[in-house]
C-alpha cells in the first residue's frame, strides 16, 4: 500500500471521529439550565417584600395625616356631645368631599382616589365618635364637661384634607400596585402602637378603600 493511500485512510478515520463527537458536544453546550423552584420562589418573595416596603415608605406622609385627622375625632365628639348635635352631618360631609375633589381636579390628582380616601376619613371619624358616645353614655362620669370650639377644629380638619389631596398625588401609582394591600398593612402597623383600641378600628376604616383592587 502506498504512502498516499495510507494518509487518505487516516484522514478518513479522523474525520469520521470528529463528526460523530460533534453532536454530543453541541447537545451539552445548548442544554438549558433549570433553576431550583424554591430559589425562584424565595427570590420573587424578596423582590415583592422590597416593593411593598418601598411603597409603604411612600405612604408615610399620607399615614401621618390620616392619624392626625383621626385624632381630631375626639374633640369633635366632645363638642357634639355637649351641644347635642348628631354625629352624622350629611350636608357637611358632602361639602368636604366636593371640596377635595375640586382641589384634586385643579391639581391633576386622581379625583376618584381622593373621593375614596376622604369618604374613608369621614367614616373613620364617625366610628370613633360613636364609640366615644357609647362610652360616655354607659359611664357618664367619663363624659366631657368642656370642649373646644367646633369651628376651630373643623378648620384644622380642612387643612389636613387639603394636605391629603396634595400628598395623594405622589402615591396614586401605589393604589394600583398588586401589593398595595401589603403596603397599607405595613403603614398601619407603623402607627398602630401609639393608638387606643377605638382609634385602631378607625385606622382600618381610614385605609379601607385606598387600594383599587
Image (spheres, grey):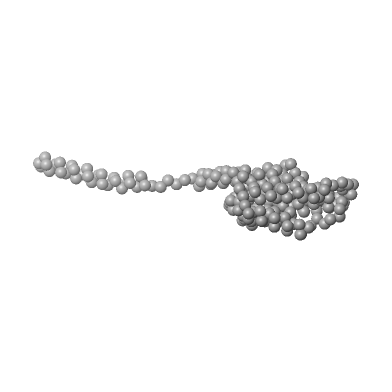
Q: Position of residue 49 (x, y in %)?
A: 58, 44
Residue at the right extreme of this rendering: 141
- x 64%, y 57%: residue: 112
Furthest toward the front, the residue is 106
Tell which of 79 and 41 is nearer to you: 79
Looking at this view, is 17 or 28 the one in front?
28
Q: Quadrant of the N terminus?
A: top left
Answer yes or no: is residue 146 visible. Answer: yes
Residue at 22%, 43% (x, y): give it.
Answer: 14
Number of numbered tags placed on the structure image: 0
Q: Answer above or below: position of 94 versus 16.
A: below
- Left or right of residue 43, residue 157 in this image: right
Residue 95 drawn at (x, y percent): 73, 57
Residue at image point 63% right, 54% down: 106
Residue 164 percent coordinates (x, y): 67, 49
Specify whether 27 is left or right of 75.
left
The C terminus lies in quadrant: bottom right
User: Which residue occupies the foreground of this view, 4 or 43?
Assistant: 43
**In this view of the protein, can residue 203 be seen by the observer?**
no
Residue drawn at x 54%, y 46% is 44
Q: Is residue 73 left or right of residue 63?
A: right
Q: Residue furthest top?
A: 3
Amino acid at each position: 500500500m502506498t504512502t498516499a493511500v495510507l494518509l487518505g485512510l487516516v484522514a478518513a478515520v479522523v474525520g469520521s471521529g470528529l463528526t460523530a463527537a460533534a453532536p454530543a458536544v453541541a447537545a451539552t453546550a445548548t442544554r438549558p439550565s433549570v433553576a431550583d423552584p424554591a430559589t425562584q420562589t424565595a427570590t420573587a418573595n424578596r423582590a415583592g417584600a422590597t416593593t411593598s416596603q418601598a411603597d409603604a415608605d411612600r405612604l408615610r406622609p399620607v399615614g401621618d395625616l390620616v392619624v392626625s385627622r383621626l385624632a381630631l375625632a375626639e374633640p369633635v365628639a366632645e363638642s357634639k356631645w355637649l351641644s347635642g348635635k348628631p354625629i352624622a352631618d350629611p350636608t357637611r360631609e358632602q361639602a368636604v368631599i366636593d371640596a377635595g375633589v375640586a382641589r384634586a381636579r385643579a391639581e391633576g390628582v386622581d379625583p376618584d382616589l381622593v373621593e375614596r380616601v376622604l369618604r374613608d376619613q369621614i367614616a373613620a371619624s364617625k366610628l370613633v365618635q360613636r364609640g366615644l358616645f357609647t362610652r360616655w353614655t354607659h359611664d357618664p362620669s367619663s363624659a366631657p364637661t368642656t370642649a373646644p370650639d367646633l369651628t376651630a377644629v373643623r378648620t384644622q380638619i380642612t387643612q389636613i384634607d387639603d394636605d391629603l389631596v396634595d400628598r395623594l398625588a405622589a402615591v396614586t401609582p401605589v393604589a394600583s400596585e398588586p401589593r398595595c394591600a401589603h403596603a397599607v398593612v405595613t403603614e398601619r402597623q407603623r402607627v398602630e402602637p401609639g393608638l387606643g383600641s377605638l382609634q385602631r378600628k378607625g385606622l382600618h376604616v381610614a385605609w379601607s378603600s385606598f387600594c383599587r383592587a
